[in-house]
Image: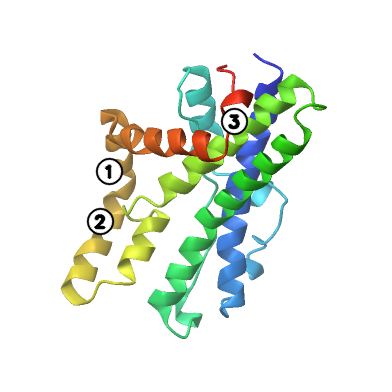
Amino acid sequence: MSLHTPLLLVLVFFSVVCHEIAHGLIAFKLGDPTAYRAGRLTFNPLPHIDILGTVILPLFLLVSGSHILFAWAKPVPVNPAYFRDPREGMMYVAMAGPGTNLAIAVALTILLHLGASVLPQWLVRAMAWGALINVVLMVFNLIPIPPLDGSRIVARFLEGRALHSYMRLERYGLFIVFGLLYLGVISRLLYPALNMAVKVLDLGKFLVRF
């Protein structure tokens, strides 16, 4: 195992926790105290751990040599009944998670470009891959399959029967996502985003396959 791998796992976990905290913070700002009362607006990792999404899946992807590494934390509870406009409120709550991953990717990239010459190589690699993983988390969560964040954004613009039929997919959402992962459909969505991120963020010189 490379020296940067444990740090990379920490960065992944930190990123998914920040993603969920962002959902809860925006919900709180919009008047919903549910996540706050549940103790989920905290960087303490324990309340955010989802055994499958936070532990088993990222470890499996890493050990299996996958070129794509992502994870998720336990979703924060949100009650849209507190929002003045529930669907619009849910859209903003949903956008907060991917937006946070984008901010982390940009922050890591800025730190890399400012400090790569003085940082140890293993740390540079971990930060570069951490930036790319946050791009993966952003794009993955924006896929419009309920219950992913992208579905809450799409739902804001649907009405009546179309909205009802769309949200009924949520009970099958994880099966659909894993099916698309197995068929390679999601990878074909993610790779162009990763290639663009490498170019836009100028990460190529920092990346070494591990």
Label 3 to label 2: alpha-carbon separation: 33 Å
* Up-down relation of residue 78 to residue 174 (above or below): below
Label 1 to label 2: alpha-carbon separation: 9 Å
Q: Which residue is mark 2?
A: 169
Residue located at (76% from left, 38% from top) = 114
- Amino acid on which the number 2 mark rests in the picture: Leu
- Amino acid on which the number 3 mark rests in the picture: Trp
Residue located at (71% from left, 18% from top) = 3
- Crowding near the residue tagged with mark 3, few <14, some 14–19, many ≥20 C-alpha atoms within 10 Å: many
- Amino acid on which the number 1 mark rests in the picture: Ile
Q: Is residue 62 left or right of residue 146?
A: right
Q: Is residue 165 left or right of residue 46?
A: left
Quadrant location of residue 152? bottom left
- Crowding near the residue tagged with mark 1, few <14, some 14–19, many ≥20 C-alpha atoms within 10 Å: some
Q: Which of disc 2 and disc 1 is earlier in sequence?
A: 2
Q: Which residue is mark 1?
A: 176
Q: Which of disc 2 and disc 3 is earlier in sequence?
A: 3
- Crowding near the residue tagged with mark 2, few <14, some 14–19, many ≥20 C-alpha atoms within 10 Å: some
Q: Residue furthest left?
A: 161
Residue located at (42% from left, 44% from top) = 140
* Contact (Cβ within 8 Å) of mark 1 with mark 2: yes
Res 70 seen here: no
